[in-house]
Image (tube, helix red, strand yellow):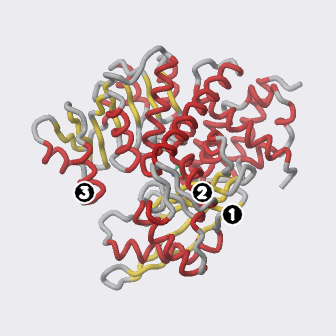
Amino acid sequence: MTTRSETRTTLDHLLTEIEHRNPAQPEFHQAAHEVLETLAPVIAARPEYAEPGLVERLVEPERQVLFRVPWQDDQGRVRVNRGFRVEFNSALGPYKGGLRFHPSVNLGVIKFLGFEQIFKNALTGLGIGGGKGGSDFDPHGRSDAEVMRFCQSFMTELYRHIGEHTDVPAGDIGVGGREIGYLFGQYRRITNRWEAGVLTGKGRGWGGSLIRPEATGYGNVLFAAAMLRERGEDLEGQTAVVSGSGNVAIYTIEKLTALGANAITCSDSSGYVVDEKGIDLDLLKQIKEVERGRVDAYAERRGSSARFVPGGRVWEVPADLALPSATQNELDENDAAALIRNGVKAVSEGANMPTTPEAVHLLQQAGVAFGPGKAANAGGVAVSALEMAQNHARTAWTAERVEEELASIMTSIHTTCHETAERYDAPGDYVTGANIAGFERVADAMLAQGVI
Ligand code: GLU
């Protein structure tokens, strides 16, 4: 029987090896640390998980695809971007995860996202493996025609690697309904197949699920509500700071407002807006989704309740709840200290890995309920899996039905994380609960399926 401390030493060695074998991929190292550092209790308790090679296989993607994406801009100039698809783990189902188009994308970023996705998808309880992809293409300031040509070129390579039973991409930062439409069109043209289940996040008239656009934000609010309930509180009357102004942030604000909370901020890379009356969603949607503009335009048009703070971070605004919904490492230890000083009760991650490890530690030490992204933001991919189910059955569910399923999945993820944390002597620690519960599901499937 290995002890927890022996197991911890073995995992530490493996982490050092991961850093050597994957140089210059700090985000992937961070994601691997965050998971492996919490697994010692379960590996020590269940000898089958100590089997040599199990964790080593888990941290090595099954397949990584890198490709050139040439396209012509509106001036006729040839541009070259890099495309990625990391097919990380398919023990539970076809690889599933979004595509991110952002200049910060590189292999390490896609690997961190793909690694997180394995555990997130496992937590949903639905049959989906983990993968992620994207490009360093920057859609910002590009015309519709340029985005279309880029998406067509991207799919001209990607199509050979994906399929409804193989790998099912969706959106992420920089990839929304418009991009999924162009990608799907090109897939259909190349393959001559109307294969609805090859991509999720499609338009509602052609195979998309109702509530998919809302699902990540709605799900995160439901997760935050479940954490508060555990402490005898609810969302009614709570003030919330939300970062970001994309799909996740918008529908986080929508659900918070619907459940009686006051969401007072949103942000983008230029700074943030604070609106004491609560964010006016119609105005925000008009600016971000229709005009594809910046958040300072919101403050300009909203009137006296709102102000724009250039370059600032929403975490300096006093609030009961914080829902980081922009990008990785956007909430560091200084931000966490400010939130704690201002009496924050819960932090729930709508983005992937938005909180640095030091900040997570501070928040947990201070007794703040902390919901890690792989649990709290799993609603998006969960409804993607429901979209796949609808596509397979050639049917479409009502919005009410999808919302009910989403609510029950989020409640069950919360319960699973909570109970798992208690079982492994870490009551209230959702990070440990989520990592161990996700790991158990994937590891059991991998062990059953042999060394592959
Ligand atoms: N990009 C989202 C995530 O981080 C959704 C992925 C999907 O729907 O496949 O989970």
Q: Are marks 1 and 3 in contact (CB under 8 Å)?
A: no
Q: Confirm whether residue 102 shows in the render.
A: no
Q: How busy is the neighbourhood of tag 3: few (under 14 within 10 Å), some, or many (20 plus)?
A: some
| Circle 3 residue | 293
Does the Cβ of the disc 3 residue fall within 8 Å of ligand 1?
Answer: no
| Circle 2 residue | 388
In depth, the one of 140 and 261 nearer the eye is: 261
Question: Farthest residue toward the bottom?
Answer: 76
Does the Cβ of the disc 1 residue fall within 8 Å of ligand 1?
Answer: no
Which sits earlier in the primary sequence, circle 3 or circle 2? 3
Taking the spot 84% from the left edge, 35% from the top edge, the residue there is 50
Q: On the image, which quarter does residue 6 sit in?
A: top right
Taking the spot 17% from the left edge, 37% from the top edge, the residue there is 306
**Going by the image, does 400 lie left or right of 424?**
left
**Position of 75 relative to 350 (above/below):** below
Q: List x then y, in percent, for residue 88.
A: 67, 54
Tell me the kind of residue under disc 3: Gly
**Going by the image, does 281 lie left or right of 106?**
left
Tell me the kind of residue under disc 1: Thr
Task: Label 1: state its secondary structure.
Answer: loop
Which sits earlier in the primary sequence, circle 2 or circle 1? 1
| Circle 1 residue | 166
Q: CA distance from mark 3 to mark 2?
A: 32 Å
Q: On the image, which quarter does residue 3 sit in?
A: top right
**Position of 421 relative to 72 (above/below):** above
In depth, the one of 195 and 141 nearer the eye is: 195
